[in-house]
Image (cartoon, grey):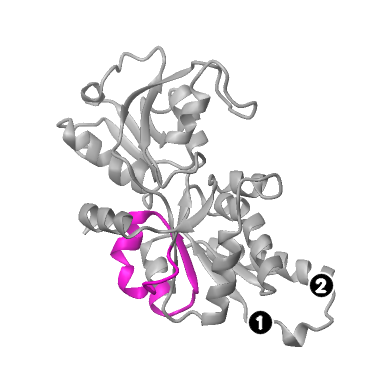
Amino acid sequence: MKISKSLRLTLLICLSYFLLYTSQGMAGSHSLPPPVTITILPCADIVTTYKKFYPLAVFLQNETGSKVIIKVPKDWEELYHLISTGETDFVYQPPHVYVQLEKYYKKSDILTALSLRGERLHHALLIVRSDSDIHKVEDLRGKSLLFGSEFSTIKTVAGKALLQRHGINYEKDLLEFRYGGSCDEIALNVYLKAADAGFVCDHVSRNLSSSPDKTWPIPPNGLRVIGETEECPTWIFSVVKSADASTVSAVIRALLSLRATQNHKALLKDIESWGFAPILESDLLILRKKFL
């Protein structure tokens, strides 16, 4: 009997937490608070997303005393099912997804993930190889392009809007377009000429200079920027209406305690964030205006 990818991932996650709990001992297990389920929309593939957020799940588990279960939906249908049936307590999502599903969430305890620079807004960069004959957005006609994941606000939704402002219909004017994975994967595909151009998050700009991070897989000055999307609010952590109130308080308190200090620096770098903060009503107004 074949086991689906989603089921295999669920089994992997459950096994991970089983091992974590048995290593801590079973004493007092009868008094454990109810488990916490967090749905995380993938910016890359499902397995990579799980690996990135596993340290955060362990942190929340240690802070709240609750078992933390990560769910990564493969598509919109699965996401909608998890939220509408109350099978998840929290959702970490790009802002345009939040707006479309806002009626399922509590109006309080909404957090925004601060960018690596500690900011509430971010944008995407449109990159090409440094030796490319593409010098402006309009030059993309007849070329191949990588967006982010289909869930991505800045690398896909805002990226398509940038093309439209420059008179390019991505479905008709491009030779090919594909939905990519992480920023590193998109950048590497562009550098290796698997695509002519691609959208990456603005934090990648630090690696486009002559002194990139040691883990950056591309030679210095191997890529350049030909365009930038409009700024959008960063990712949103929201609470599903059916979530237990005490669980919500514990998780929100733990997330707000995270800061890019030595203790939490590696954890936050994995999820490409500086920390969390309560969302501003002004940011919600921006989102509703852009995406409703």
Disc 2 or disc 1, which is closer to the eye?
Answer: 1
Which residue is located at x 68 percent, y 62 percent? Answer: 58
Where's residue 90, x and y in %? 49, 69
Residue 64 shows in this picture: yes
202 over 58 or under it: above or below:
above
Which label is found at residue 33?
1
Where's residue 24, x and y in %? 83, 70
Which residue is located at x 17 percent, y 30 percent? Answer: 166
**Quarter of the figure with the N terminus:** bottom right
Which label is found at residue 213?
none
Report the amino acid beneath label 1: Pro
- Residue that mark 2 sits on: 22
Q: Residue 76 lies in what quarter of the image?
A: bottom left
What element does badge 1 sit on? loop
Report the amino acid beneath label 2: Thr
Residue count near mark 2 (Cα–Cα under 10 Å), binned few <14, some 14–19, many ≥20: few
Compare residues 290 and 196 and report the one nearer the observer.
290
Where's residue 99, x and y in %? 30, 62
Tell me how far mark 2 sits from mark 1, CA to CA: 16 Å
Q: Residue 291 lies in what quarter of the image?
A: bottom left
Where's residue 71, x and y in %? 54, 65
Compare residues 166 and 256 and report the one nearer the observer.
256
In primary-sequence order, the first of circles 2 and 1 is: 2
111 relative to 28 in the view: left or right = left
| Residue 26 within the magenta-colored segment of the rendering | no
Which residue is located at x 70 percent, y 44 percent? Answer: 262
125 over 88 or under it: above or below:
above
**Quarter of the figure with the C terminus:** bottom left
Question: What stretch of residues is rendered in magenta?
Answer: 83-110
